[in-house]
Amino acid sequence: MARGETIYFAPYQQGDWSLYLAGTEQGVCVITLPNESFATLEKWAAKKAPGAVLVEDRERLAEYAGQLDEYFAGERSEFAMPLDLRGTPFQVAVWQALLAVKAGTTQTYSQIAESVGRANAVRAVGAAIGANPVPIVVPCHRVIGKDGSLTGFRGGLPAKQVLLALEDR
């Protein structure tokens, strides 16, 4: 059997949060959230990169971990790392739209739907946002309900609150 592509991963600790950071030769492909385990990364790899080999390599991912450290320390609001976003064309369009939402600001699901030219596809946009494999860097936490409420974050609303408060310094 031919060996598949390599996905490099490293555990990443931020306060009480234990995350996993993963990347390919193309860029960062997965960041797990505090309520997710290594199994989340394994499941993503099985679905999006069948046959891939997961290899722990902290050194290879150190630059990206360093950018996350700077973000959590309040020293970085934008990331400069290549991304390997794997999803449908619609999902990738939504994730690209999220990258335009600047730190310290929020947008509604409706606004994101409008920005990708699918104003009536708010639920589909919500599903695409929920499938975002690179949260924090692709800032899905910056999307809120039409009434301004915090809704729908795969990492849980407390984590969303922490990330938004971190950016509101």
Image (spheres, rainbow, N blue to C red):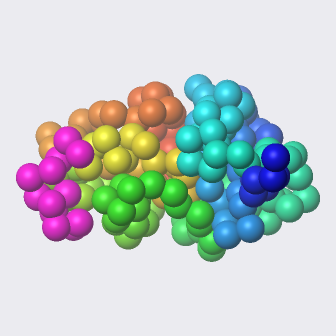
Is residue 34 a member of the stretch shown in magenta? no
- What residue is shown at x 11% (from left), y 58% (from top)? 119
Q: Residue furthest left?
A: 120
- Provide the residue span drawn in magenta: 113-124
Q: Quadrant of residue 151?
A: top left
**Residue 104 pos. (x, y %):** 41, 59
In this rendering, position of residue 6 left or right of residue 130: right
**Residue 146 pos. (x, y %):** 15, 44
Q: Quadrant of residue 87?
A: bottom left
- Tell me if I can see residue 144 in this picture: no
- What residue is shown at x 67% (from left), y 69% (from top)? 26
In this rendering, position of residue 120 left or right of residue 64: left
- What residue is shown at x 40% (from left), y 66% (from top)? 96
> Residue 80 versus residue 55: which sits nearer the camera?
55
In this rendering, position of residue 163 left or right of residue 9: left
- Tell me if I can see residue 149 in this picture: yes
**Residue 126 pos. (x, y %):** 28, 43
* 28 in relation to 149, above or below: below
* 32 in relation to 85, above or below: above
